[in-house]
Image (cartoon, rainbow, N blue to C red):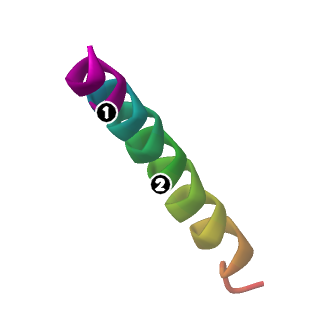
């Protein structure tokens, strides 16, 4: 049970991390 929660939490973290990296790319895009 605990491991399932941890793995789903890691999946969410990975998705958030990817989105954050994409956002940083857009913010730092040379204008």
Please give left or right for residue 3 compared with residue 16 in the image: left
Location of residue 14 (image quadrant): top left
Q: Residue at 55%, 57% (x, y): give it.
A: 22
Label 1 sits on residue: 6
Q: Measured from the top left, where is residue 23 in percent x and y?
A: 65, 60
Asked whether the residues under the numbered discs 2 and 1 touch, taking CB atoms below 8 Å apart as contact, a structural biologist would say no
Q: Secondary structure at mark 1?
A: helix
Q: Residue at 34%, 39% (x, y): give it.
A: 10
The prevailing secondary structure element of the residues shown in magenta is: helix
Query: Would you call the spot at circle 2 few (<14 residues within 10 Å), some (14-19), or many (20 or more)?
Result: few
Residue 3 lies within the magenta run: yes
Quadrant location of the C terminus? bottom right
Outermost residue toward the right? 31
Q: Residue 30, which numbered label?
A: none
Query: Would you call the spot at circle 1 few (<14 residues within 10 Å), some (14-19), or many (20 or more)?
Result: few
- Sequence order check, earlier mark of 2 and 1: 1
Q: Residue 17, which numbered label?
A: 2
Q: Nearer the viewer, residue 11 or 2?
A: 2
Seen in the picture, residue 27 relative to 30 is either above or below; the reply is above
Please give left or right for residue 18 compared with residue 2 in the image: right
Residue 27 lies within the magenta run: no
Q: CA distance from mark 2 to mark 1?
A: 16 Å
Quadrant location of the N terminus? top left
Outermost residue toward the left? 3
Outermost residue toward the front? 2
Q: Which residues are magenta?
A: 1-6
Please give left or right for residue 8 compared with residue 31 in the image: left
Q: Nearer the viewer, residue 19 or 12?
A: 12
Q: Residue at 36%, 23% (x, y): give it.
A: 5
């Amino acid at each position: 049970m605990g491991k399932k929660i941890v793995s789903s939490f890691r999946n969410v973290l990975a998705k958030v991390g990817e989105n954050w990296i994409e956002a940083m790319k857009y913010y730092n895009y040379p204008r």
